[in-house]
Image: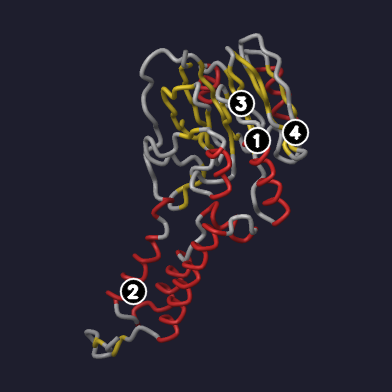
Amino acid sequence: MAPQSTADGKVAVFPKWASIVLFITTVAYGIVLIGCTWFPEIWGFSILANFRVHGFTVGIFLFVACGIRSNVKTMIAVVLCQWCYLIPLLPYPTSGDAPNGQSAISVFAHNIQKHPSLTPPQLSAARAADVSLFFEVTPTFATWLESSFPAPCFHRARADGFGVALCSDHSIAPTFPLLEDYPAINVTLRGLEIIGVHLMPPVSPDRARLQQAQIRTLATNAKPHQIIIGDFNATPWAALLRPMLDAGLQTDNYRSGILNTWGDFPVRLPIDLCFFGDRLTLESRRILQKFGSDHHAQRVDFSIAD
């Protein structure tokens, strides 16, 4: 690129080292895309596919490092190119379709991020559903549920952040099956099987393998009258979720736009998901206001096919 003079007569040049870094970043991103598509079982590609890790940080670094020494138009182009990698993470509407009619069953699910209790708005939203599911349930929160939630509650509390709980006014008897040694929630209501899950985050090779095993277990046991909902620690475009779709389950994550549930701008991700069988018709899925957690709660309403 040809040098350009600034107003004070100095020459501003896009540094060669920055060009090299940008080139390497672009090539690396291409390798990541290929790896995430064809080799998702490899841990490094698996975590990248989950969260679309990309060159955005490099773009900001170049912008700050080069500053006014660089050609402004070139730097704008650099930053815009890097921001293109962020398109899947930009804010989308946080409310889904409105219900089309009377739902046959409604489910509320929320990762409470180890909070010790519910706020009044959260409690009200949870009580409005037939079944309320909670994740990252600690012994402290379980004690609060038992004493303060105005409906019968069942839980498997854990101090490590993988405890689960269920509350409902309906007469139910939930079980807590293990997904690779971590509890899920399983309950049958109105002929439907509802499974609440908090899957392992793939922050290490061992945890990534656990998460993949958990997903394979869910896919193997998929049924047409099943709802699987919770914190998957994976985005809907992650390759590792393909077994769920291949098993005949559906998801709504592209029906009303990508409904982000975790994080804040500029990094917001749809990792709290819902899959369901073909016996169910989705009436609405709504992402609710944050209640202190780093996750939004979600509520789904279904009708049941005859």
The mark closer to the camera, 4 or 3, is 4
Q: Which of marks 3 and 1 precedes in the sequence?
A: 3
Q: CA distance from mark 1 to mark 3?
A: 23 Å
Residue density around tag 4, few if under 14, some if 14–19, many if 20 or more, within 10 Å: few
Q: In which quadrant is the N terminus drawn?
A: bottom left
As drawn, the label of residue 75 is 2
Q: Secondary structure at mark 3?
A: strand
- Drawn side of residue 71 relative to residue 214, left or right: left
As drawn, the label of residue 133 is 3
Q: Which of marks 1 and 4 precedes in the sequence?
A: 4
Which amino acid type corresponds to the residue marked 3 in the rendered image? Answer: Leu
- Drawn side of residue 104 relative to residue 87, left or right: right
Is 233 situated above or below 204? above
Q: Looking at the picture, how far across and down is residue 68, in whole percent? A: 34, 79
- Drawn side of residue 114 relative to residue 291, left or right: right
The mark closer to the camera, 2 or 1, is 1
The mark closer to the camera, 4 or 1, is 1
Which amino acid type corresponds to the residue marked 1 in the rendered image? Answer: Thr
Is 237 situated above or below 197? below
- Residue at 62% x, 13% y is 150
- Residue at 44% x, 71% y is 26
Q: Tell me the residue that label 1 is attached to.
A: 220
**Residue 165, located in which quarter of the rendered image?**
top right
Q: Are marks 2 and 1 in contact (CB under 8 Å)?
A: no
Q: Secondary structure at mark 2?
A: helix
Is 168 situated above or below 158? above
